[in-house]
Amino acid sequence: MIHYALKRIFTGLITIWFIASATFLAMHMVPGDPLADEKAVPLEIRTALLEYYGLDQPLPVQYLRFFNNMLHGDFGLSFTQKNRAVNDIIRAHFPVSALLGCIALLFATGGAMLWGALAARFHRHWPDYLIMGVVVASISIPGFVFAALAQIAVLHINQQFGTQFPLAGWGTVQQMLLPALVLGLGTMAYMARLMRSSMLDVQQAQYIRTARAKGLSSSRIFWIHTLRNAALPVFSTLGPAIAAITTGGFVVETVFAIPGLGRYFVQAVQQLDYTVIMGTTVFYGSFLVLMVLVVDLLVGVIDPRIRLQDGR
Amino acid sequence: MPIPAWAVSHAVNANTQTVQMALSTEPPNLNSLTSTDSVSFFMLLHLQEGLLSYGDNDELVGGVAESWRMDGTHVSFTLRDNARWSDGKPVRAQDFVFAWRTVLDKKTASNYAFIFYPIKNAEKIHRGELSPDELGVMADDDRHLRVELEQPTAYFLSLTTFATYFPLREDFYTTQQSRYAADAGKLLYNGAFTLKEWTHGASLTLEKNPQYWNAANIKLNAINIPHITNDANTLFNLFQSNEIALTELSRETLPQALQQRLYIQSFLNGMLNYMEFNFREKSPLHNHALREAISLVIDRQALVNKVIAAPGTRPTTNFFPAWLPGLLPSTNNIPAPDIEKARQALSLAKKELNVETLPPLTLLIYDTPSAVRQAEYLQRILQQTLGIQLIIDKQIFKQKLAKLNSGDFDMALSAWGPDYNDPMTFADLLASSNANNHGRYSNPQYDQLVAQAARLPLGDTRAETFATMQTIIAKDISVVPLTEPGIIYVQNRQLKNVKRSRFGGDPDFRHAYIEEKPSL
């Protein structure tokens, strides 16, 4: 188990190095001038700016400098948000994205279990068709449509009933629920489908037949044997799902005016803010690697078969 | 988690004299030495003040300075006795000297350093040829500031309203080092408001500054900014639910506002939208007849009414927007397209360029929906009338700028906004040495007129000089002025006296107040 974990941590570090290097190269290959502004500046100012940001150095030197600073945990100052350190940006805005992501994930996993199990329970009956219809719609309709619709719905409710549900913003629990729901919807739909097919597989399995033959009650078979086994493959997608939800909040964060890291991540790419691009990418990359690792180890704990296969 | 006070308050409150609004983005840079963007300028207008300021009708009024005198190249300012920083210390002449020298220090890398060039030695200091101590600015004592100019500069006083000219206190700035202005506590204020709270990316609160010399005439107690988003629908929804008092309308939200019979206002934001040509030898657009042919087929009325289709925007043929002071009265007759003349010009162009058919031309634009619609209109009209094939080169912000700067275009749709209240802020743009003259248009006569206008005192001769420039631009077809864009917006009926300004920060809430009952 420890050997397995160490091996995974090592490959994780290699992955992060690769992500950082590939992003660094790709970023410098993107056409465009990171220091360009609507009002062009005379040559001497430009030279001073290039020096200030270290962009006057050849690329290999910039790369080595970046790595040296990264190993010291310093990603430098943002190009567009002058005076703000990239570390401060991550520290201030990632917790917001993480909290939003956690609530969204609770919605997603809880909902997926419920709807997936229900659909499988009523396989090829109307609840199955209804749920799967909603699920397919949720996967195909983009998040910004849901976000906008949800906000208009709240506005109309407020105007009709004189209530004061918040339309946007961040800080209160009420302000968190709606964006989290919208954010979790896609993942919930995807996981619900997985849950349903997994349930159907398990229902056909030999041990379920054995359990039935032993005369166990159908509710006991459903709760203890089917549901628990069927949930496993769904749990193993949690790692990427956590990363997707915490990083994929750009649209939701914009519509609901939430100060999450997703907005900074996307805007940095649009504005060629080199230091923020590198900082957020390395941070998110590490986060993804970590989450996949944690989930894999946890699945190993939940399901002894996986641990036996890998833990030599 | 405690509920912030603003979460339960409304767009306006007459009892507390507070207003709520939204910002499109987090203020990127509140360090006045290096700020360049409109959101930061909006914040700085309320938080700090220069020697002079603009009044309600864009006239110059005293800011930190209570009186001033300009005599040729000598300018002197007397500072107010009661101008104070938010920590109670007086604003001194030395604070201006320190700020201005720091801007021109190459290490500061300020984009707007060139706005100091009228001051003696500024350009040489900025190039690193002289030390910052040799800048033509002196503090005689705490309250008297003297400025030496390179040459008489009529618009110099307007420049002192600009954010880059704001004062800065050396002791405070040095202790903050590179983190100056990064947070609410890392700034000093000498303006009408102070930044009380700044939660990055989420909210800001501006509170009336009791130390401000004119605090008695500031009626608003607070400006709350509970939301930061650029989503037009969200902003309009927030306005409708009475969470913000003011918002711009987009093409998408305008129909809803009309349907609900909201009171919609518009305002020309001072900008000019125009088409640039590439005068480099590699582009066929260096040919005058070809530029003429293209300029003749553009129907500005159709462009404004059918393509842009947003109320408030005006077609124009003038390079100098009519709101600028110190211009001769101009007529803005929008000519109808002249296809016949355009075709003649085109055949002349082909002869001069020695080609049978023209190669496809590229039109460089930003990837915004409005720019794309305008480009598609031009593409169609050029194809239909002249058989010219136009390739639309749609680029994101930084890439369009990079291509403009490197001359990688034939034509481009560009916009220019004024920095100060004088025609020079436009005239300068087409000078051959200007870095924003992307197409490298160059006419020695025009350059000479720019240099002349810079020196001339305000008056008829100067106004005529600008008129001559306009004639040259029209004759050379250096650029094609297209439209003066307008902003359309809705504003809470109780919110009064908000000034919309074309330069130096917009909207201006400094003299705004909240009325008791909605007026009808």
Image: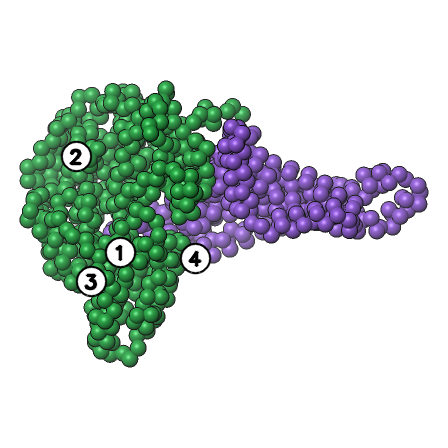
Chain colours: A purple, B green
Label 4 CA crowd tier, 10 Å (few <14, some 14–19, many 20+): few
Q: Report the side of B267 relative to B203 (left or right).
A: left
Q: Share a chain, discs 2 and 3?
A: yes
Q: CA distance from mark 1 to mark 3?
A: 12 Å
Compared to B467, does A170 lie above or below?
A: above
Q: Which residue is mark 4?
A: A30
**Considering the numbered disc 4 on the image, is that residue within a helix, a strand or a loop?**
loop
Q: CA distance from mark 2 to mark 3?
A: 34 Å
Q: Residue A299's image quarter?
A: top right
Label disc, if present, on residue B482 of the rendered structure: 1
Please report contact status of discs 4 and 1: CB closer than 8 Å, yes or no: no
Q: Report the side of B207 relative to B287 (left or right).
A: right
Residue at image location 12% in from the left, 45% down from the top: B326
Compared to B190, does B309 lie above or below?
A: below
The chain identifier of the residue carrying mark 3 reads B
Please report contact status of discs 2 and 1: CB closer than 8 Å, yes or no: no
The chain identifier of the residue carrying mark 4 reads A
**Considering the numbered disc 1 on the image, is that residue within a helix, a strand or a loop?**
strand
Q: CA distance from mark 4 to mark 2?
A: 45 Å
Q: CA distance from mark 4 to mark 3?
A: 34 Å
Q: Quadrant of the N terminus of chain B?
A: top right
Identify the amino acid type marked 3: Ile
Q: Which residue is mark 2?
A: B60
Residue B53 or B190: which is nearer the viewer?
B53
Residue B314's x, y, as percent?
Answer: 27, 50
Q: Share a chain, discs 2 and 1?
A: yes
**Considering the numbered disc 2 on the image, is that residue within a helix, a strand or a loop?**
strand
Residue at image location 59% in from the left, 46% down from the top: A244
